[in-house]
Image: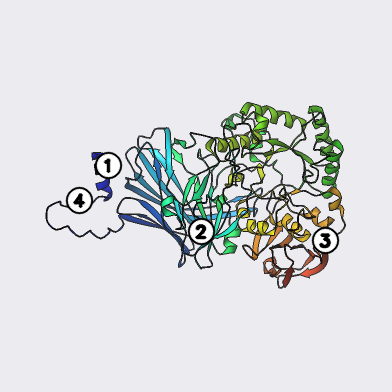
Amino acid sequence: MKISAKKLAAALMAGSIALTAVGCGPTEQKPAPKPDLNSWNVTSPDGTIDVRIGMDSAGALYYTVQKGDVAVVDQSTLGFAVAEDDLSFLTFEGEKTERVTGSYDNVTGKRSHVEYDCNQTTLTFKAWQFYLDVVMRAYDDGYAFRYAIRGVDGGEGTLTVEEEKTEFALPENSVVWSQPYVTNKATGKFFSYEEAYVRRKASNLAGKIISMPMLYQAGESEVYSLITESELIGSGFYGSFLEESEEKEGTGILQTVRTPATALETDNVVSYPFESPWRVGITGDMKTVIESELVEKVYDDAEYWKPDDYDSLTAEEQATYDYSWVEPGVTAWNWLRYTGSVGQNDWDLQISYVDLAAEMGWKYTILDGGWSAGSTFNTAGLTKFCEYAAQKGVKVLVWCDALVDFSNGVESLLCSKLDQWKSCGVAGIKIDFFDGQNANAPKFQGEDIDMIKWYETIYQETARRQMIVNCHGANKPTGERRIYPNVINREAIRGNEMRNIDSSVTVNSMFTRGVLGSCDFTPVVTPRSSGMTMGQQMALAVLYESGTPSMADYADTYRDELINNFYKSVPAARDETVYLCGLPDEYYCAAVRVGDEWFVAGINGILESQATIDFSFLGEGSYTAEFFTDAEGAKTVEKQTKTITSATKETVSMAKNGGFVYHLTKV
């Protein structure tokens, strides 16, 4: 084996090569493995989560994670491989530890006020031309880490990422709930996070590319962990998936890999100084995982986005970037029920849904795909429509294609169309097909580097114009509303557009995708398939957190006296979310507080079951509750009025594919 002098010196510094005498005598016994050259521990503020980072005798970096006495991540590789330097030959340069604490207020999210607290250790290693920083954090509800790569000379340039080495080694006997990467191979590599989350053994993941988030139960414990990434937008990096390498198939050791949904040949070229997205592991019992905002807390006290010329703007112009104009609100949406003979450019149809929104006290209505065909909603028609809606106290959102409507992603065309729509009175956009499926030979798609940059361009240009954004055909949320609070809703979920959706999909989505952020599931009242009941659809209107929840049924459905008041009260913003009980594949129950009102909802899977609801979270006082549950036959619901206090416990029987809702108002 021939080793260059430079690599030999580095290996000796790292202790990765043992020199032995070579002679004609008996072969020497192979020395026992050397202990780690160094190791570091990062422990959560409450002491329950411990992350250990090690540098082994070959100079390779790894980490493990413990929750109490439960192994959450077994020994797993850390690091990057780049073409411009050998980051496997590293010397330790220094360590910095600090406590990161603070709080922030949300426009939308699981709760209106969030506090964060973690211990952070930054380890700096030196290769030949670059420093590699590993930033590791331990929170009470999980762990997070990221990398930074910077030139030794302090310069700037580009790096070719050959491989991210990050692994997540799942403990033996772990069970995984994951969404596989599925694409239409006949037309391209597309993905919009709309597959079901399926239960598998961790030993049965060979050959599968897995999207984030991924939930798993650590061995045979009651500890769960949800793996995802955060701060992807603005990172200059591609989105990542998880996959076993060929040599580790069947081991449950998942490596972080480049998105398979890409059209770019140079998707692995990044600028440095470089900071990777955070790799996040929300960890604890199920309540901890469900209620966690860790994917957003890693942003710390980040400020909302402002343009580079902010300081030169007038006070009025600067006020745009306090984002006080971002208003969560329930939305009237008719595309799901009117996709046939009556089109989205039907004036009378759209006016009728403005009227519905006004009657219900909802904030928005949407002109969806096809609205701009013909002359009904030309500039004059759109202006007239927005003026009518404004008189009714309703704001208008318009659908557009992320690529096709802007000539495959041309910023100048994006800006001109946003200016045109804004001048007509449009309040925001529902922008679709980020996966690229509708485009002709898209130059970028999915989660490649240029598409991630395109997301950011859209967020910024809409913010400049005080317009909100609902992303469809999109990637998973990665915490970006901490920077762009105008990004108020997102699909990236298997929703009611799919006629064959059933409760096995909705239940598992609560434990996985629903943890990350807003979900535009588009609930109806009357189910579109036999796989869900009316009671479940009502519960979903509460359980999916969304800044603009889109009510997707016929207008007259919401005028039914039985459910009218409930749908007038459905929350778009919430002050608190409390997980109550459930199990993946079986059922899910949670409570949502808006001011002094509470909504308690549950959805059930494919077998009849019961859920016991403990109302101790209510605190002092009595509440009047309207209780909706599936009637016999599951085609409608029954309503009862009850008095509930914090001492109340109720066992609710849930029909197959069913659900229930309590709407509680304080007496």
First in sequence, mark 3 or 4: give its number.
4
Residue closest to the far left:
24
Q: Is residue 59 left or right of residue 159?
A: left
516 vs 329, nearest the viewer: 516
Q: Which of 263/559 is in front?
A: 263
Q: Residues within 10 Å of mark 2 (few under 14, many from 20)?
A: some
Give the structural element (helix, strand or loop) at label 1.
Answer: helix
Query: According to the image, label 4 marks what residue?
Result: 19
- Gap in Å between the C-alphas at discs 1 and 3? 72 Å
Q: Is residue 118 above or below residue 85?
A: below
Mark closer to the chain start, 1 or 3: 1
Q: Could you tell which of marks 4 and 2 lies nearer the N-terminus?
A: 4
Name the spot of residue 312 as percent of width and height, x first.
Answer: 59, 29
Could you give the CA–CA distance between mark 4 and mark 2, rounded to whole angstroms? 41 Å
Q: Which mark is residue 7?
A: 1
Q: Which residue is mark 2?
A: 204
Instruction: Kindly identify which residue carries mark 3.
Output: 636
Q: Secondary structure at mark 2?
A: helix
Marked residue nearer the N-terminal end (3 or 2) = 2
Residue depicted at x 79% and y 28% = 378
Amino acid at the residue labelled 1 = Lys
Does residue 463 lie above or below 145 as drawn? above
Residue 191 quadrant: top right
Inter-mark Cα distance, 1 to 2: 39 Å
